[in-house]
Image (cartoon, rainbow, N blue to C red):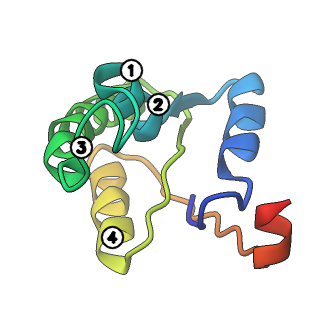
Amino acid sequence: MSGLQGAGKTTLARALERSGFRRLCPDEEMFRRHGHYGKDFPRGEFRVREAPILLDIAREFRRLLQNGHDVVLDHGLWTPEERGQWAATAMEVGGQPVLIYLPESHEVRWS
């Protein structure tokens, strides 16, 4: 999935999960391990704390795909590099990546 906060990525990812996909969400794992950004851990540490989580998610992503599961990555994938890395990971283990882009206006995102 690709899209800014509030575009509906998690809503769609949860719907896919209900239909049998395995949902992986780095943001939820980040919160589980570290709490709220800027409250439970200092601002400026997000990327450092996120890096091992993304590695763990990538391992689980590979494992699930290798075992024949459909997987939805509930993550922003904001840069072409990120999208390319995850697509390559999927293809390495026989998966077929599909990018779902969710554009949304600022008015709708804020509502």
For label 2, the SS is: helix
Residue with the mark numbered 4: 84
Question: Which disc, if any, is residue 28?
Answer: 2
Q: CA distance from mark 2 to mark 1?
A: 6 Å
Residue with the mark numbered 3: 50
Q: CA distance from mark 3 to mark 2?
A: 11 Å
In the rendered structure, which disc, 3 or 4, sits on the residue that comes first in sequence? 3
Q: Is residue 10 left or right of residue 53?
A: right
Residue visible at 20% across and 56% down?
A: 44
In the rendered structure, which disc, 3 or 2, sits on the residue that comes first in sequence? 2
* Amino acid type at mark 3: Glu
Q: CA distance from mark 4 to mark 2?
A: 22 Å
Q: Is residue 8 left or right of residue 73?
A: right
From the viewer's perspective, is residue 99 above or below residue 42?
A: below
Question: Which disc, if any, is residue 32?
Answer: 1
Q: Position of residue 38 (x, y in %)?
A: 34, 44
Q: CA distance from mark 1 to mark 4?
A: 27 Å
Question: From the image, which quarter does the C terminus lie in?
Answer: bottom right
* Amino acid type at mark 2: Glu
Pointer 3: residues within 10 angstroms few (<14), some, or many (20+)? some
From the viewer's perspective, is residue 56 above or below residue 105?
A: above
* Amino acid type at mark 4: Gly
In the rendered structure, which disc, 1 or 4, sits on the residue that comes first in sequence? 1
Decide which of 94, 17 is in the foreground and name it.
Answer: 17
Q: Are marks 2 and 1 in contact (CB under 8 Å)?
A: yes
For label 4, the SS is: helix
Question: Which disc, if any, is residue 90?
Answer: none
